[in-house]
Image (spheres, helix red, strand yellow):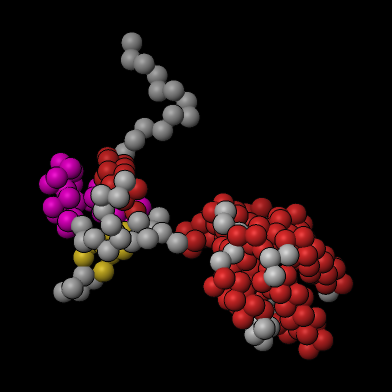
């Protein structure tokens, strides 16, 4: 009697052979970023698969940021370097599906970012400290705010904090209501960011943590006062 397929066990597809082989070569350093790969036809011959199957594998690798496909006479299939975009897109979908609120977002940041800022005060390079201060002194905008928090996460020296917070901060561009921010609010934010940047620049870990905590507490108060706290981080897809 034929064995029943175990429930929940995924049967590998033929395209997985191509995906796994190329992914392993990239991770092992056998394929450097920028390397031009074989054509679809050559891959199909090497793996003994049809071109449709190879094309599906390449689509999955491109989605994950491991390859880029360029058209035209100088085009081809090239190894690329994944960036935070792939993580951000998956996270954005989950936030939309769960209808996650801005208050949930603010609570998460309040629990995590002060500690990350403390790490940045300890681990940031001199170049990173100066870059944080430069961004903090620029005019306030959604992009500058995201850039500042991203650079602090990057300067923490911890990859997981960096990847997670960069993926989270992509939501700032969506929910930031420029028209609801007064000139006085912008000045308060500018001063808060400068205090954070200065504490990081001075290697004052405790001071940096306290400055970020106060800043995020004020941010959460702003969400409540402006009626935004229970709006979704990302609007639902139409």
Give the image location of residue 230, x and y in percent: 79, 62
Please name whichever residue, 122 or 25, is drawn nearer the observer in this view of the structure: 122
Write the start and end of the magenta stretch as one range: 38-60
Give the image location of residue 7, x and y in percent: 47, 26
At x 66% / y 53%, what residue is drawn? 98
At x 18% / y 73%, what residue is drawn? 74
Question: Which quadrant would the C terminus be assigned to in this image?
Answer: bottom right
Residue extending farthest to the top is 1
Residue extending farthest to the bottom is 183
Please name whichever residue, 158 or 198, is drawn nearer the observer in this view of the structure: 198
Side of 118 where 26 appears, left or right: left
Q: Is residue 91 above or below residue 144?
A: above
Please name whichever residue, 122 or 227, is drawn nearer the observer in this view of the structure: 122
Q: Is residue 88 above or below residue 218?
A: above
At x 67% / y 83%, what residue is drawn? 137
Question: Which quadrant would the N terminus be assigned to in this image?
Answer: top left
The quarter of the picture where residue 177 lies is bottom right
The quarter of the picture where residue 206 lies is bottom right
Q: Is residue 142 above or below residue 113?
A: below
Principal SS element in the magenta part?
Answer: helix
At x 51% / y 56%, what residue is drawn? 87
Please name whichever residue, 169 or 134, is drawn nearer the observer in this view of the structure: 134
User: From where the camera sits, is residue 205 visible?
Assistant: yes
User: From where the camera sits, is residue 101 visible?
Assistant: no
Give the image location of residue 99, x and y in percent: 68, 57
Q: Does 47 appear in magenta?
A: yes
Give the image location of residue 80, x and y in percent: 33, 61
Q: Does 144 appear in magenta?
A: no
């Amino acid at each position: 009697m034929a064995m029943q397929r175990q429930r929940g066990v995924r049967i590998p597809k033929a395209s997985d052979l191509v995906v796994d082989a190329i992914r392993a070569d990239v991770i092992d350093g056998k394929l450097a970023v920028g390397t031009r790969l074989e054509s679809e036809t050559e891959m199909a011959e090497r793996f003994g698969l049809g071109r449709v199957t190879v094309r599906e594998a390449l689509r999955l690798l491109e989605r994950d940021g491991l390859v880029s496909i360029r058209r035209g006479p100088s085009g081809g299939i090239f190894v690329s370097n994944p960036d935070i975009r792939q993580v951000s897109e998956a996270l954005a979908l989950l936030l939309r599906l769960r209808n996650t609120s801005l208050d949930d977002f603010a609570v998460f940041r309040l629990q995590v970012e002060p500690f990350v800022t403390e790490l940045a005060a300890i681990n940031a390079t001199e170049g990173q400290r100066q870059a944080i201060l430069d961004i903090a002194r620029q005019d306030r905008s959604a992009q500058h705010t995201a850039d500042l928090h991203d650079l602090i996460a990057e300067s923490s020296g911890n990859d997981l904090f960096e990847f997670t917070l960069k993926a989270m901060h992509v939501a700032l561009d969506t929910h930031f209501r420029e028209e609801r921010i007064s000139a006085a609010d912008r000045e308060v934010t500018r001063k808060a960011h400068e205090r954070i940047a200065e504490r990081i620049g001075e290697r004052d870990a405790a001071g940096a943590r306290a400055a970020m905590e106060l800043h995020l507490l004020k941010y959460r108060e702003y969400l409540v006062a402006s009626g935004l706290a229970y709006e979704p981080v990302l609007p639902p897809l139409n």
